[in-house]
Amino acid sequence: MSVIVKPIFTEKQTALTDKYENRYGFIVKPSANKVEIKKAVEALYNVHVESVNTMKYDGKKRSRYTKSGMVNGSTSAYKKAIITLKKGETIDLFSNI
């Protein structure tokens, strides 16, 4: 079972990838450490990882008004990893679409 959940395709992450061509973002399992993330990316995409930066995000409280009244909930907490590859290497994230 891989520690990588999915790649990130947001405007902010795309701008980072455009500015630095060898950086990619992934949502990973909260229990994963940097060594596990590095091994998983290298095995999955057949590239050499130079560094891994991780960030943990807490879920946010959300509420909305509906016909039946106020509905409260929260978004999910997750962990994000920014992968820096060795110079000249790239990952084609759209190859299996």
Image: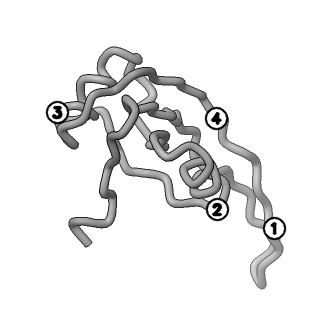
Q: CA distance from mark 3 to mark 2?
A: 27 Å
Give me the residue at 41% from left, 51% from top: 7
Q: Is residue 51 left or right of residue 95?
A: right
Tell me the amino acid under the disc marked 3: Ala
At which x and y percent is residue 49? 34, 26
Q: Are marks 4 and 2 in contact (CB under 8 Å)?
A: no
At which x and y percent is residue 11? 64, 62
Tell me the amino acid under the disc marked 4: Tyr
Q: Which residue position holds label 3?
A: 43
| Outermost residue toward the bottom in this view | 67
Q: Is residue 45 above or below residue 8?
A: above
Give me the residue at 49% from left, 53% from top: 8
User: Which quadrant of the structure image shows residue 54?
Assistant: top right
User: Which quadrant of the structure image shows residue 55?
Assistant: top right
Foreground: 32 or 48?
Answer: 48
Q: Is residue 15 above or below residue 53?
A: below
Q: Secondary structure at mark 1?
A: strand
Q: Secondary structure at mark 2?
A: helix
Q: Secondary structure at mark 3?
A: helix
Q: CA distance from mark 3 to mark 4?
A: 26 Å
Q: CA distance from mark 4 to mark 2?
A: 18 Å
Q: Which residue position holds label 2?
A: 11
Q: Is residue 95 left or right of residue 64?
A: left
Q: CA distance from mark 4 to mark 1?
A: 25 Å
Q: Are marks 1 and 2 in contact (CB under 8 Å)?
A: no
Q: Which residue position holds label 4?
A: 57
Give me the residue at 74% from left, 57% from top: 72
Q: Which residue position holds label 1?
A: 70
Q: Report the mark closest to the observer, 4 or 2.
A: 2
At which x and y percent is residue 12? 67, 54
